[in-house]
Image: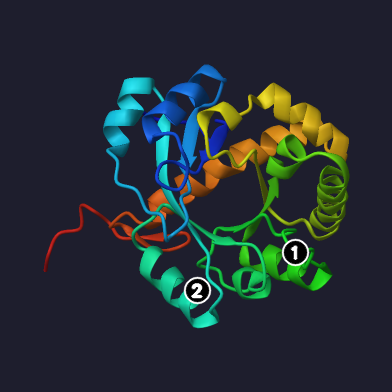
Amino acid sequence: MAHESTSMYATAHARPDGVSSVARFALTARESGFDGLIVRNHDDYKSTFDRAAIGAAYDIDVVNAIEIRSDDRSSVASAITKYRPERTIVGVHGGQFNRMACEDPRVDVLCHPMADGAFNHVLAAAAAANEVAVEFNFGRVLRATGGERVHAISGLQKLRTLVEKYDVPFVVSADPSSHLELRSPRELNAVGETVGFSRSQIQAGFEQWGKIAERNRVRQSESFIEPGVYTDSYEEND
């Protein structure tokens, strides 16, 4: 199933990292108006699924991703090296290794970078230079209440200011662990407006997931050498 770069993608932590299967997420994502589904289980909760079969069954592009998390710096570095050739999208769980992720061009997404509030102008500049997208994760805004929700909104507002100032690529998600937590683009537009984003910016955040997947599929193809350089599949042997 071919997809244009303007397609919108949802994300999911599927069983065993979440409670719903990849297939159930795919059905709900398609019914909610998404064109693709990023399966982003943490590396300690990997799942096995037939990406092509599920995609064909629900008419949706299923992307095999990973979200690396660890309390050990060397473990994060080793996991990036391990999963980069295997997964279409490689993310790093936000926290104490935010800087490491932003400075590594092999990383596609810094996931929920405001988890501990440790994201600043230095990291924003590094992410922009290395084309590491930062995630606007609306999970806490959608599911928390009271002071926790207010704190989450404040963090996202700060992140938006840095992203706009340094022109950092960004993605948007509801970060669901159940298909019942998956939200439609319209619902997430409303959350985004609370943070200060326009609807077009929120849509761009959905689309960026697909653009990353499309770019990396090209890079993982046998003909790719480096950006802008490809082998000639029809070149004859001497």
Q: Residue 2's quadrant in the figure?
A: top left
Q: Residue 87's quadrant in the figure?
A: bottom left
Residue drawn at (44%, 41%) of the image: 14
Mark 2, secondary structure of its residue: helix
**Foreground residue among 31 and 56:** 31
Q: Name the quadrant of the C terminus.
A: bottom left
* 12 to 78, vertically: above or below: above
Q: Position of residue 32 (x, y in %)?
A: 57, 20
Q: Position of residue 86 (x, y in %)?
A: 34, 59
Task: Describe residue 141's horizontal placement relative to residue 75 as left or right.
Answer: right
Q: CA distance from mark 1 to mark 2?
A: 18 Å
Residue hosting label 2: 76
Q: Position of residue 167 (x, y in %)?
A: 77, 56
- The disc, 1 or 2, on the residue closer to the chain's N-terminal end is 2
Looking at the rendered structure, the kind of residue marked 2 is Val
Residue hosting label 1: 116
- The crowding category of the residue bearing disc 1, from other C-alpha atoms within 10 Å (few below 14, some 14 to 19, many at least 20), is few
* 154 to 69, vertically: above or below: above
Looking at the rendered structure, the kind of residue marked 1 is Asp
Residue drawn at (55%, 35%) of the image: 10
Please report contact status of discs 1 and 2: CB closer than 8 Å, yes or no: no
Q: Position of residue 45 (x, y in %)?
A: 41, 55
